[in-house]
Amino acid sequence: MIKRLNKLYKNNDASIEELEYILDHLDEESTQHLLKLSLQTKEEHYQDTVFMRGLIEISNYCKQNCTYCGIRRDNTEADRYRLDKEGILACCQLGYDLGYRTFVLQGGEDNYYSDDVMTDIVKTINTQFPECAITLSLGERSYESYKALYEAGADRYLLRHETASPDLYAKLHPGMSFENRRKCHQYLKEIGFQVGAGCMVGLPEQTNHDLALDLKYLKELEPQMVGIGPFIAHKKTPLGNNPGGTVDQTLVMLALTRLLLPSVLLPSTTALGTLDNQGREKALKAGGNVVMPNLSPIEHREKYELYEDKICTGDEAAHCRKCIEGRINSAGFTVDMSRGDHVHWKRGK
Ligand code: SAH
């Protein structure tokens, strides 16, 4: 196993069979070796730095019905909210004053944010905070819509592929199309966005073969950003009684992703911090180099409940900013508050 991992570290690629073999045969010693190689790779590209992004959860209205997600359309118990332009700008101002230079606007697929509304919001953020990067995470939209958002000034788009297994995808996403989600990645790339993909780990019925498919999809797509987190059940969803993913499984997937895409921007996710108080620190030590503390208004935080027991829902943005910085430092890393674009990306290239 050590030899196989060294080979992966050197080649930054492997077949689906090889990745599946590795996932099947990792033991305590080889896992430690994998985490070491992954951290080393991250350090070769980003030294000891960790980028901070300010996350603004703009809406929990959603027209989709993903069976794992707490803000799915059919969850009638979700207390719905959305932020208008002024509300979003207020979060950006708060974040700016705390030193953030990237704003991530994430939400359910909410028709309120038409192309006109959304491009106006993006343009205004761009005018008021010209040196800041704008990341969007608003689900599937048309080519024309993505293009208009890019031209309005959005720089990055996060759209996890969720799972690269067509069967599993179909079971989890009633009414949605596996092909369309992938097509969206192609659109986003073609337009010039820094693209984010990624998946959940520990989904019901997910096998190591499925996870190997996820890794290979990431390698082939070559996104600039990859979000990977454990699936955590939400009781008001059809998957409410499932066990969910583990921290260890997620760390392995993060580390393998780092080896496949050495210069990727790889967040240490809130979902990991939810499973384990030290989860986010562990992810940084496994090759993660981004954190996304919350800037959403406190009165709405609890309502953006994708999964249960989400952490930090009661904490002021300033508190999150300091708390995360402390965690980053205690894990042995330093905070980088710059825009933090991917090393190989420039607008218009
Ligand atoms: N509507 C946007 C944003 C989705 S929320 C989009 O489609 O991209 C962001 C991510 O949260 C999702 O991509 C999904 O991977 C994750 N997520 C949703 N429900 C979850 C759960 N129960 N456990 C863990 N992660 C979850």
Image (cartoon, helix red, strand yellow):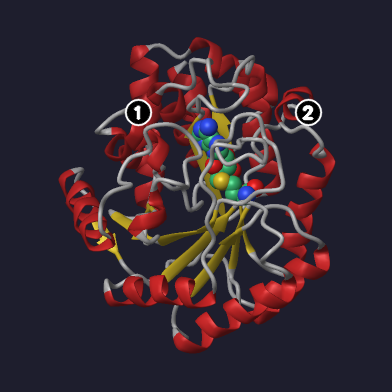
Q: Is residue 33 left or right of residue 322?
A: right
Question: Could you tell me which secondary element the residue under label 2 belongs to?
Answer: helix
Give the quarter of the image for residue 248. Answer: top left
Tell me, yes or no, if residue 10 can be seen here.
no
Residue 273 in picture, x, y percent from top left: 33, 36
Closer to us: 226 or 321: 321
The residue to which callout 1 is attached is: 275
What is the quadrant of residue 336 in the picture? bottom left
Tell me how far mark 2 sits from mark 1, CA to CA.
Answer: 27 Å
Q: Which residue is painted at 31% across and 38% down in the image? A: 285
Going by the image, does 254 lie left or right of 160? left
Q: Name the N-terminal-most of marks 2 and 1.
A: 2
For the point 54% across and 12% down, the residue is 24
- Residue shown at the point (63%, 18%) measured from the top left: 206
The front one of 90 and 37 is 90
Residue 283 visible (yes or no)? yes
Percent position of residue 105, x then y = 52, 63
Residue closer to the observer: 159 or 336: 159
Q: Residue beneath label 2, please?
A: 170
Across and down, in percent, residue 214 comes to 65, 32
Q: Is residue 173 above or below residue 64?
A: above
Q: How many marks?
A: 2
Give the crowd class for mark 1: few <14, some 14-19, many >=20 residues within 10 Å: some
Instruction: Tell me the amino acid under the disc marked 1.
Output: Leu
Q: Residue at x 52, y 71 (%)?
A: 134
Q: Disc 2 residue type?
A: Ala
Q: Is residue 330 above or below residue 86?
A: above
Q: Which mark is residue 289?
A: none
Quadrant housing the C terminus? bottom right
Residue 157 in picture, x, y percent from top left = 61, 60
- Is 238 or 159 nearer to us in this picture? 238
